[in-house]
Image (cartoon, grey):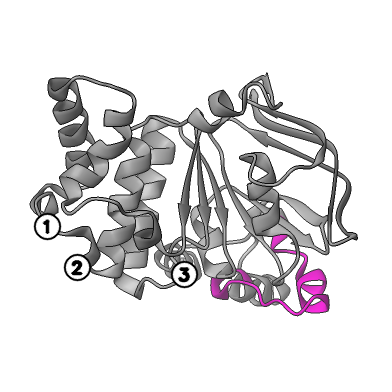
Amino acid sequence: MENILVIKDLNFKYHNKPIFNNFNLTIKKGTWVTVIGPNGGGKSTLIKIIVGLLPAEGYIAVDNILKNKDNIKEIRKKIGVIFENPENTFVAETVMDEIAFALENLEMNKEEIKQKIMEVSEYLNITDILEKNPFQLSGGQKQLVALASVLVLEPKILILDEAINRVDYLDRENILKVLQKLNKEKGITIINITHDIEEALYGDDVILIDNGKIILNGSKELVFKEEKIFNKIGLDLPFMAELSLNLMYYDLVDRMIFDMDEMVDTLWK
């Protein structure tokens, strides 16, 4: 599988305090990677470096394009970022105009803009709110509008920076399932930075970062077996991962099972 993000020998200091020291990371195209770790571990700083909001030393390539000051705009076209507070980026009085805003900046014609808006809104099931004011929507709806505004530009990588932190449980489940659909059907690479360990169960791989270093990096099945490492840095495992480990200890299951229905079926066999 081809790499879509390659970082080599990344070095970054903040107020003379080293955050990253010869940091290396590779992410495969089309995967869903969840980045977790204690607060202040460098998760959000890493994203700001990748999209060029913070200067740093080292090699960064996005979709086979080496990042430098001359092509940062081209790099940013390949990356869509959704933040915790989407209303901070809203500029329009209707959802339709909000989604259209970025396309208008590309000087796209009106018919093409309308077509793209309808395609993305139907895909995300938000056609019923296109005429509403985005500032007056629920937290989950706001994040779907932010997602639509990014997806309409057809990015190769979608980054969520604590993006569903303030969304209630049902909306969170809906958004995560939409993201799964995007990942599987559209092949969009997803990087989800979160402090909610349960969100990691929706992706493929997990990266645990602490003090600017990668502590663990691999499939969720392998990473969540390292319970002692999580405990050492003060993090809990997802409920289903912890349950799986306990049941594996007593030979009741022979592998990590992250779906409750699958767990019940396995135990009843």
* Quadrant housing residue 255: bottom right
Mark closer to the chain start, 1 or 3: 1
Query: Which residue matches tag 2?
Result: 136
As rendered, which of 55 and 161 lies closer to the eye? Answer: 55
Judged left or right of residue 258, residue 184 is: left
Horizontal and vertical percent position of residue 39? 69, 72
Horizontal and vertical percent position of residue 141? 25, 61
Are the residues at dot 1 and dot 3 in contact (C-beta closer than 8 Å)? no
Judged left or right of residue 231, residue 203 is: left
- Number of residues whose C-alpha sits closer than 10 Å to that of mark 2, classed few (under 14), some (14–19) or many (20 or more): few
Mark closer to the chain start, 3 or 2: 2
Residue 2 visible to the viewer: yes
Real-space Cα separation, disc 3 to disc 2, in angstroms = 18 Å
Disc ID at residue 132 = 1
Instruction: Indicate the quadrant containing the N terminus: top left, top right, bottom left or bottom right.
Output: top right
- Amino acid bearing label 3: Asn
Q: Tell me what residue is drawn at x 49 percent, y 55 percent.
A: 202
Query: Which residue matches tag 3?
Result: 165
Q: For mark 2, give the secondary structure.
A: helix
- Amino acid bearing label 2: Gln
103 vs 204: above or below: above
Q: Tell me what residue is drawn at x 34 percent, y 75 percent.
A: 168
Horizontal and vertical percent position of residue 70? 66, 21
Tell me the magenta residue range.
223-241
Residue 137 visible to the viewer: no
* Quadrant housing residue 42: bottom right
